[in-house]
Image: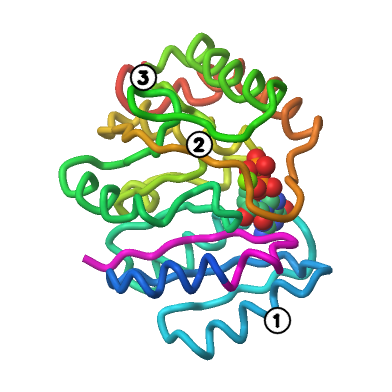
Amino acid sequence: MHAVIVMPTYNEADNIEDITTSIMEMDIGVSMVIVDDNSPDGTGLIADRLAEKFPRVRVLHRAEKKGYGLACIQGFEEAFAMGADVIFQMDADFSHDPAYLPEFLSAIGSHDVVIGSRYVRGGAVKNWGILRRVISKGGSLYSRIFTGMKLKDFTSGYRCYRSEVLKSIDFSKIATKGYGFLVELAYICCKMGYDVYEIPIVFADRRVGQSKMTGGIVLEAALAVPRLRWKYRGIGVGSS
Ligand SMILES: Nc1nc2c(ncn2[C@@H]2O[C@H](COP(=O)(O)OP(=O)(O)O)[C@@H](O)[C@H]2O)c(=O)[nH]1
Ligand SMILES: [Mg+2]
């Protein structure tokens, strides 16, 4: 099974080397695609050096910051071209502990999509202030109410998909960039009838650097989520 991790980066110069090295040293046969949006702090240059050191690491450079969602989509396409059987989404900031990778790999053997969830039994959030906790948990509750899907953690960006799942999705319809992208993609997977399974993760706040979360990203999701059912009424299970 060829697994490829898609890792979008923007100003992760203090994290990219450590996270990449940690993953490569696990020696579990996974490859990586780092998608950098021309980070002003030079993340892309460090990533290029890592790609020279580790043959399993590739880097995509985009000219400007175009958002998390589009970076993921471009990374997925690269992973398809690399012949991936399973594709991960993972952040560079150590919120997503590489130690969970083997658990994802074992779960994806019997499910179509595996989401690392903070809100199932055994999952947790560490070192986050009250505001981030409320936005995150509230966002998942909000998404559950509007989409009618039973997921507990809609906005976790630590995920693993069978490649066929991502290949079957029309990404040209997805315009959301941040959390909205995560909710939309999770919703489409459920709506298409794929088996989406949540495994518990302990999510720690980023080790170093700044969050790229903004009020605009929260607002984008808040506006997009209530429209999802209508937007995708024609696809998948239960469509008319
Ligand atoms: N390529 C790219 N990566 C991004 C962009 N925005 C965020 N990221 C990366 O996506 C991941 C999640 O972003 P982060 O700021 O940690 O969001 P948070 O965890 O919600 O605070 C990190 O690896 C970021 O470097 C973007 O516009 N382009
Ligand atoms: Mg983060």
When the figure is inspected, residue 53 is found, relative to residue 236, above or below; the finding is below
Expressed as whole percent of the image width and height from the top left, the position of residue 85 reads 27, 62
Q: What residue is shown with label 2?
A: 156
Q: Quadrant of residue 82?
A: bottom left
Classify the position of the C terminus by image quarter.
top left
The disc labelled 3 sits on which kind of residue?
Ser
The disc labelled 1 sits on which kind of residue?
Leu
Expressed as whole percent of the image width and height from the top left, the position of residue 41 reads 81, 69
- Left or right: 110 as drawn, with respect to 234: left
Identified at 74% across, 39% down, the residue is 213
Front one among 68 and 232: 68
Q: What residue is shown with label 3?
A: 239
Whether residue 14 appears in magenta in the rendering, the answer is: yes
What stretch of residues is rendered in magenta?
1-17
| Residue found at the far top of this picture | 145
N-term mark: 2 or 3: 2
When the figure is inspected, residue 182 is found, relative to residue 103, above or below; the finding is above
Q: Residues within 10 Å of mark 1 (few under 14, many from 20)?
A: some
The label number, if any, that marks residue 167 in the structure image:
none
The disc labelled 2 sits on which kind of residue?
Ser
Front one among 156 and 196: 156
Front one among 227 and 27: 27
Q: Marks 1 and 3, Cα distance to the nearest angstrom?
A: 47 Å
Residue 35 visible? The answer is yes
Q: What residue is shown with label 1?
A: 45
Front one among 191 and 202: 202
Classify the position of the N terminus by image quarter.
bottom left
Mark 2 C-beta to ligand 1 under 8 Å: no
Expressed as whole percent of the image width and height from the top left, the position of residue 29 reads 29, 72
| Residue found at the far left of this picture | 110
Identified at 24% across, 47% down, the residue is 108
Identified at 61% across, 42% down, the residue is 205
